[in-house]
Image: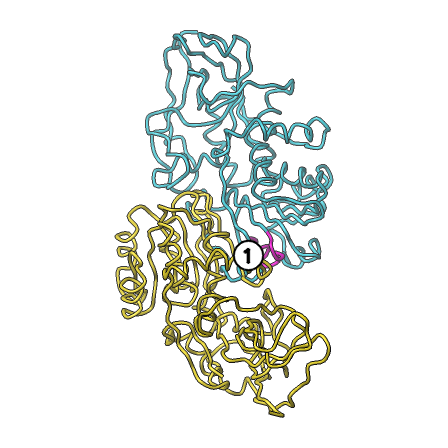
Chain colours: A yellow, B cyan
Amino acid sequence: MTTYTAINLIKYHERGPISPDYFQTVKLDKPNANAGELIVKQTYMSLDPAMFGWMNADTDSYMPPVELGTVMRSFGIGEVVESNHSGFNVGDRITGMMGWQEYFLSNGEGLEKVDSSLPDVDILSVLSLPGLTATQGLFNVGKAKSGETLVVTGAAGSVGSIVGQLAKADGLRVIGIVGSEEKANWIVKELGFDGAINYKSDELDAQLAALAPNGIDLFFENTGGPIQHLIYNRMNEHGRIVLCGLIAGYEKGEYSAAPSWMNAIRKRLTIQGFVMTDHFHNSQALLEKLAPYVLEGKIKHRSHVLTGLESAISGLNLFSTGGNKGKLIVKL
Amino acid sequence: MTTYTAINLIKYHERGPISPDYFQTVKLDKPNANAGELIVKQTYMSLDPAMFGWMNADTDSYMPPVELGTVMRSFGIGEVVESNHSGFNVGDRITGMMGWQEYFLSNGEGLEKVDSSLPDVDILSVLSLPGLTATQGLFNVGKAKSGETLVVTGAAGSVGSIVGQLAKADGLRVIGIVGSEEKANWIVKELGFDGAINYKSDELDAQLAALAPNGIDLFFENTGGPIQHLIYNRMNEHGRIVLCGLIAGYEKGEYSAAPSWMNAIRKRLTIQGFVMTDHFHNSQALLEKLAPYVLEGKIKHRSHVLTGLESAISGLNLFSTGGNKGKLIVKL
């Protein structure tokens, strides 16, 4: 190998589907690992809704947008193939922000060694961004308590499906909002949710009332969309709303108004936005919290694996159409 | 005295100005204080925006609405004139929820003895509901920190004026939103706010940008109204929004949509509603926090005193018109 392939972002995205003209595929010369450096051969890359923020120049976002002409940002897993770094050996399995490229030269910063025998796809689907996000959001932000009722949107998604299963394992009543009957069936029959609502069906408020007869204590928001208001109106006193994502607005770059703050006063709600990148320093503790659930087989998942670096481009559109079935991953 | 006057609520309020037909003035026989009871002669009553919630049958509020045909709920101050209660002596000064009436029969529950030599009006204006609410909201909910920038709406109001002065004393940059030039002058020149914006003036966003060049860390919301969105858009990362009131909507019973939750994710904001009645059990600690500021002369206030029990009725409309200048109080 003397060259490798990478995909650079060359145009910022505002709205509409992701097309190939936002990107440029380039061949690069293989770098050498100098003192203190290592090279990772990436095996799988994670596709995540947060990428819409990283591709938007105007986003006043928690991470700066990707600089045009540089490799598209992404999280992935791979194996160390060359190391001049005392902390890493050839053969180590590694996760980190490696970008859309086959090889990744690093000084080690931000990389984590994988301490698990699970396959790469399972690591990316559970024991990395999705699981960290779910664990941080549900427990540290949402302060989930046994006996409470949780509603989670995007419940068949990579984060939502873990949130619901963690909550279920901890004794909460769990209702998931999804976009198809197939997903509704999956989260109830396979994942053990207490109920599911297809937001494209009718009588949403009546369905919510039937499934959450004692109101809602915790609302884990991944999607936005009109059902947000119905959930909000059924929040119990001292309820918490964990804002993780608003994927319904990402493609259009538009976000609908939120419910009036009056109920937040009357019910003394706490509404809190969070992003996982703030909490990477706490990853080890989060993984220690999450791992037992995984080892006990309480976290089922499904992955939607695309093949080839360039499949990442059209793959991003599956978030907007809801066409993905499980965690989106690109096999290199 | 064998009879006394009270005002009962006889009709629930939804929207529109408060008119006398919501109430009935009654003459009642003076009660006797049996064992374990005491009688307070009320001297001043507090008028508070929260009353709109207490008068609304449909409000899914933190306190049940006043039962029709019973005395209107209110906070007040007075003196014990008869006691068969071991904890209270004739002559004690007392605050509590005494209602719209000249005399108040109580078993002592919920009453607090006044441990201050300040006049009654000052107690009601600072060292009771307004001061407790400001202290709880600013420090315990908002977690104000020296060096941060605070924007408070309703800044010339009973709670807002104290919030701003406490924050100023603690080293925050403080900007107040008010509804008149007179109030703007008062909070800057008399109370020492760093800046004021009259929400009825023009170029609100430019004014906000000029007064908060480093963005806004803490937003203490008393009023609602369109400026809410401008403040929200200038929140800094990890900012806090303390939801105390939305007085702009009380008369109409309608509350405008809140800003999209997208910024709350990007900026990792915490938006939290609170009501002081949840925290009465903590009053002693709050007063101990507040009292030194008052004793050091750091909390100026002005009171708007109406005279006579029945002046309370039309007095409530001053909240909607912004016609009150300072804390609304009724002298009995």
Image position, residue B327 (x, y; %): 58, 32
User: Is residue B131 depicted above or below A11 in this figure?
Assistant: above
Task: Give, as a single range, the part of the protein colored magenta.
Answer: B227-239
User: Is residue B32 depicted above or below A331 in this figure?
Assistant: above
Residue B257 can be seen, yes or no: no
Q: Quadrant of the N terminus of chain B?
A: top left
Left or right: B212 in relation to A73: right
Does the magenta portion include B261? no
**Nearer the observer, A4 or B113:** A4
Residue at coordinates 55% horizontally, 56% vertically from top-left?
B229
Image position, residue B105 (x, y; %): 42, 15
Residue A280 can be seen, yes or no: yes
**Nearer the observer, B218 or A306:** A306
Q: Amino acid at mark 1?
A: His
Image position, residue B123 (x, y; %): 60, 24
Query: Residue under mark 1: which chain is it in?
Result: B
Left or right: B45 in relation to B237: left
Residue at coordinates 57% horizontally, 59% vertically from top-left?
A279
Number of numbered discs overlaid on the protein picture: 1
Task: Answer few, some or many: residues within 10 Å of disc 1's Cα (few below 14, many 20 plus, some between 14 and 19).
Answer: some
Classify residue B22 by image quadrant.
top left
Image position, residue B234 (x, y; %): 62, 58
Regarding mark 1 in the picture, which secondary structure is present there?
Answer: helix
Check disc 1 and report the residue beneath it: B229
